[in-house]
Amino acid sequence: MKKGLLTGVIIAFIGIVFLVYNNRTILFNKAVDYTKLSKANKHKVIFTFKIRQSGSTPADPYYAINTTIKNNSKYKVKINLEDFKIIGDRPKYNPKPTKNRTLTINPNHKVEITNLFNKISGQAILGGNLIAYKDSSNILACPDVTKSYTVKSSDLASVSKSQISSILENEKANTNNSISKASSADDDTSDAYAKTVLNSFVKVYKKQGYLNVYKIKLTVLKNDDNDSYIFKDQQNGARMNIIREDQDGKYMYHPMVVNNPDSIIELQPLNVSLFESKYNAVKSIFSVTYKDNKKQ
């Protein structure tokens, strides 16, 4: 009797051990979304972003990002490539991933993704950058995505919290502006914005007496790389509007600092050939012609 009871206890114990082990096996075999991992396990998943120049336009070089993900955790980790984000200071132009498949990465394995992001224009990303997965609670890196180099998620510890906060605050502010002013003159891709630029330039130009000529045509230029009316100075990062002046069969380009029309008084016309070699500018439909100081 005692022997039978002891045998039953042993069998039950073995069953419990097997059940616990089997449940843990099922748990570890089930893929876990990266965002559901604990903070400690997230640190064990290393993201490496290799940024390189992949081409150029007349206005600006553009860049691509290859990514390697190394899973050092004990879990299978699930990652949707479509959920990677580049956060910059102009959310309207933040690049989107080129991939949309979901990966499952086994423990102690790695995967490599070529061109997770591609054709990232320096004209589109003007400020600091963050690479995140899904949202700002999963920041992976704080690179300058317009420079060729390699950055890892483990490097994030050396980035100040204030720098990350500043980028996120700019992103939030510009997102709110885009929502509330999408159809206004503050949207630098809108017709209203282009008209405001032209009117501001004409007002200052007229005040200086530059329209008191036989015939002059002024046209707002559009940046064909980011579909806006803003050009970034490649030396100092200043944001400029550019006005083309046609007169007597010749033309020149006038820079005007964004939101500062009076800057045209101090700034010299641009070197035409140099500007055209560096920027992909096109004439917009917004122009005005004056003859002897009178609008035609």
Image: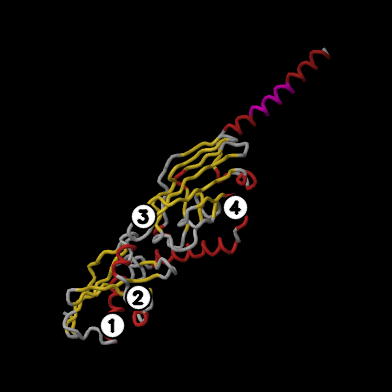
Q: In this view, does 20 lie to the left or right of 223?
A: right
- Between the C-alphas of marks 2 and 1, the distance is 11 Å
- Between the C-alphas of marks 1 and 4, the distance is 50 Å
Badge 3 marks a residue whose secondary structure is strand
Query: Considering only vertical position in the picture, is 154 above or below 248?
Result: above
**Image quarter hosting the N terminus:** top right
The amino acid beneath tag 2 is: Met
Can you give x and y, in whole percent of width and height, for residue 271 in the image? Answer: 31, 71
Q: Mark 2 points at which residue?
A: 256
Q: Which of marks 1 and 3 is nearer the N terminus?
A: 3
- Between the C-alphas of marks 2 and 3, the distance is 25 Å
In the image, which residues are magenta? 12-22
Which residue appears at 54% of the width and 51% of the height? 151
Structural crowding at the residue carrying mark 3, measured as other residues with C-alpha within 10 Å and reported as few (<14), some (14–19) or many (≥20): few
Q: Mark 1 points at which residue?
A: 205
The amino acid beneath tag 1 is: Tyr
The amino acid beneath tag 4 is: Asp
Structural crowding at the residue carrying mark 1, measured as other residues with C-alpha within 10 Å and reported as few (<14), some (14–19) or many (≥20): some
Whether residue 27 appears in magenta in the rendering, the answer is no
- Between the C-alphas of marks 1 and 3, the distance is 35 Å
Q: Mark 4 points at which residue?
A: 155
Marker disc for residue 56: 3
Q: Which of 141 and 59 is in front in this view?
A: 59
Can you give x and y, in whole percent of width and height, for residue 181 in the image? Answer: 37, 68
* Label 2 with label 1: CB-CB less than 8 Å: no
The amino acid beneath tag 3 is: Ser
Q: Which residue lies furthest to the right in this view?
A: 2
Q: Which of marks 2 and 1 is nearer the N terminus?
A: 1
- Between the C-alphas of marks 4 and 3, the distance is 28 Å
